Image (cartoon, helix red, strand yellow):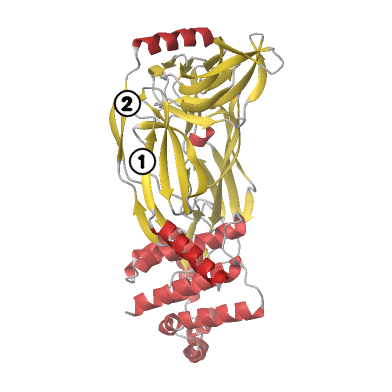
Amino acid sequence: MRILCLAVALIALSFSAYANVDFTAVVSPNPVVVGQNFQVSFRISNGSARSVDPPSFDDFAFVNGPQVSQSTQILNGRMSSTQEFIYVLRAKREGAFSIGPASTTIDGKKYRTKPVTVKVIAKSQQQLAREQALQKQLADNVFIEAHASPRSVYQGEQLLLSYRFFSALNFSDQDFSQPSLNNLWLEKLDTESRGVQVQKDGKRMVRFDLLRAIAFPQKSGEIRLEPYTANITVKVPDNSRTRRDMFGFRRQEYSNEPLSLRSPSLVLNVKPLPEQGKPANFAGIVGEYTVTMSVDKQQAKANDAVTVRIVFEGKGNLKLIDAPELDVPRDIEVYDPKVNDNIDVTSSGMKGRRVFEYVLIPRRAGEFEVQATDVAWFDPKKEQYQQLAKPSVALTIGEGDGDASGIVASGSRSEEVEIVGKDIRFVKEIDAGSLTKADQDSFFGSVLFYVAALAPFPLVLVLVGWRKQSSKSPSTAQRQAQAAKQFGASAKRLQSASSPTYKDIEGLLRTYVSDRFLLPIGEQNKDSIASTLSTHGVNEGTVTHLLATLDQCAMSMYAPSTEQSSPVAMLDQARSVVEQLESEVSA
């Protein structure tokens, strides 16, 4: 019975102790001096929370936090607990500033603190004088170094920019502020996250790389870079205070002093790019480059992929270089280029190569020339513009698989070409003067005359047989109506027989387009497909979906990547496209 009463008393005591949960905000010290660190503590009495959602501290410099502490005490038989979330801030300027409410959840219930006001006062003359003396005293022991090389460059030319912090003293509560660095494109270099012990000016110091980057000025003229700033607390020997240890030896005393630091300002002289000799197509590329254009194979068959590469190699901001446009004959399909970068960024600058790979698919046989637009850049070392005028590659395309791949492109033969259906005949002109009157007279009444007169009779029999045979073949309307059904059956066989390939899927789609919209495979390209489907009332979005699926099939075949869809997923996508086309054409 006594044990039961004790348990009930403890439960009642715990309930009464934790029933009154309190959540408050406390600032210490308050008021504070400009540049001084202070604490904001969000205190939970008689409760516990996993975290606190703090308010904005935009009016102050954030130093660190939150530091979490927990304490429990029993006084006169009453138990109480306190949990604190402590943030360390630094006052930046004079004035009265409000810190908004923090919030937290305790045992499923929401709590909020009341706003608190922090009063920031100016430093006294004595404090200013002491700080200035301290900065002068410590100038060679704690400082920020700024460096830019070279400081005179052309617009878009690269330079090395670095800010480093050095200290021969122990320090804490560091708050570094990077300048805005407007009008500079930055490529940051890897730096040590921790300090590095170095020897500088005969002293052992710790060095922190605040910022190391390759910078590219984006405008000409004088660019003034604001200083890098820092507020820290340093541990300084205090000769005014000494003490003796237990053995009687005198020991050095130290004091923690707030210190404000500023790096030197940097000024860059950025020269404008010259107007004299500037090519009309100059797009702002600056660097020391070589530019080449090549093709993986100069001879191929129709409907086989050919890869054209344009390579920029050298020193400069390679990441700003855009893909040149290709001028290709209408019988060649070209896909959006794939960009391959092999770029290093070191203290000596950005260098490497950017490769643009274009996949081309010629749809007809013939001799072709593929040109790129003029490529121009400014070389800052030579101080002049460089240009590769209309680089090109030649292609010889032979007959391949496809409805019209055997058609020879115009200009490949001197005779006139006549195309009838899928047949090609070369038509030669005959001089009428070469037929003499004697030739005409000798023909009438001759054996050849009677053979020609009787020839139509067997021809009529042949035509009758052809008509009967053609009546068994599907008409154009039947072919169109059965296109989707044929696609579905072929896709099903393809998936059940073996794993489909991207080439098979592309072939199924092109065959469907050929049958459904009477557009031969050999005449299919992006423009002809879009134009034909548009005349049949297909929505632009569906046309884009179809062309994108064909592009993905081609890219997966000729320029595979780790991000491409699987063949099974691509086949499902092709089915979806055909279903959408059928719904729109039939509507």
Horizontal and vertical percent position of residue 446: 52, 79
At a point 39% along the width and 45% down the height, the residue shown is 54
Question: Going by the picture, which residue comes out furthest to the right?
Answer: 247
Residue 471 in sight here: yes
The kind of secondary structure element at disc 2 is strand
Q: Which of the image's four quarters has the C terminus? A: bottom left
Lateral position of residue 39 relative to residue 95, left or right: right
Disc 1 crowd, CA 10 A, few/some/many (<14, 14-19, 20+)? few
Quadrant of the rendered image containing residue 166: top right
Measure the alpha-carbon separation of dots 2 and 1.
17 Å
At a point 46% along the width and 76% down the height, the residue shown is 515
Callout 2, which amino acid? Val
Residue 282 in sight here: no
Which residue is under mark 2? 120
Which residue is under mark 1? 56
Callout 1, which amino acid? Ser
The kind of secondary structure element at disc 1 is loop
Disc 2 crowd, CA 10 A, few/some/many (<14, 14-19, 20+)? many
The image shows residue 299, relative to residue 557, as above or below, that is above
Horizontal and vertical percent position of residue 353: 60, 35
At a point 36% along the width and 57% down the height, the residue shown is 110
Q: Name the foreground residue: 170 vs 42.
A: 42
Horizontal and vertical percent position of residue 82: 46, 48
